[in-house]
Image (tube, helix red, strand yellow):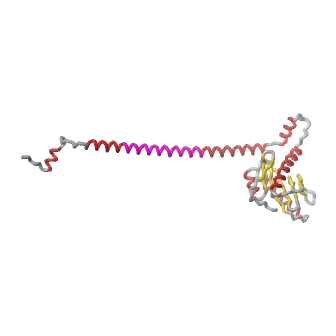
Amino acid sequence: MKTTLPPEQKKKAAGKDAPIQSGSLGDIMFERIWALLIEDQQKKERYLDQIEKRFFRQIEENNRQLEESGNKFIRRMEEKRNEYIEDLDISEIINSINSKIGLKKKKIIKGDSFTELYKNLIRTSIISKFDEMGYHFDDISLGRHIIDKKKNKRTEIDIILENKDCITAVKIITKPGSKNVNLLSSQLKILKSHRSKYNDKRKIYGAIAGAAVEKEEKQAALNAGIFVFEQDGITMKAGISQNFVPHEW
């Protein structure tokens, strides 16, 4: 006859020496290994995510540094160009030309002649550009002096273009700077006052032209309604937008 142990004694009887049921240890090991694999995979994914973020942050930083370096280089080149233009001595150019053609002693090209040649080159180019824009001039003069009743010179305008409807005064830029725009504005006022004395009711416009027009200077001229012509190889180009409206003095 079999004796049935109470539940408490069954637990004590099982103890450490109780047999392990088939498959229980394998299940436990599998679950632990699977959990470790999942944890390891998650760590790898977090690590790769961090690497990717650092990689793209580094690319962005490199791009920013390259852009900053490029901007600094452009600004430096503009500064160098302006320094060169400011230090440029026309007499040195003339001497160089004369030297190359073997006329060191007999200077056939003088400063005034060189300036007049430069003005004529600009005049020819901007007249062509004005024609393309619908402004046709039949009276062109260089170095126009405006004098008062006492024969004192009030101002001198580099180029004046005239037709029956308007007069356009052109300031040739030899050294960059916004003062050129201010100077031309004052010259246009003097020109307007001078022509009014002769009951000349034609419109008066202004323009700046040259090889050394700065960005700030160009923008100041456009804001004032002044035409801008910039060097483009051996000719000039109009530096204005299609909706540009010239100011009338």
Towards the viewer: 196 or 63: 63
Task: Name the quarter where the C terminus is drawn.
Answer: bottom right
- Residue at position x 45%, y 43% from top? 47
Q: Quadrant of residue 34?
A: top left
Tell whether position 61 is magenta.
yes
Q: Which residues are magenta?
A: 37-64
Tell whether position 234 is magenta.
no
Identity of the residue furthest to the right in this view: 150
- Judged left or right of residue 51, residue 168 is right
* Percent position of residue 174, x then y: 81, 48
Towards the viewer: 136 or 162: 136
- Residue at position x 69%, y 44% from top? 76
* Percent position of residue 112, x then y: 89, 45
Q: Quadrant of residue 46?
A: top left
Identity of the residue furthest to the left in this view: 1
Towards the viewer: 133 or 232: 133
In the image, residue 9 sits, relative to residue 101, either above or below, namely below
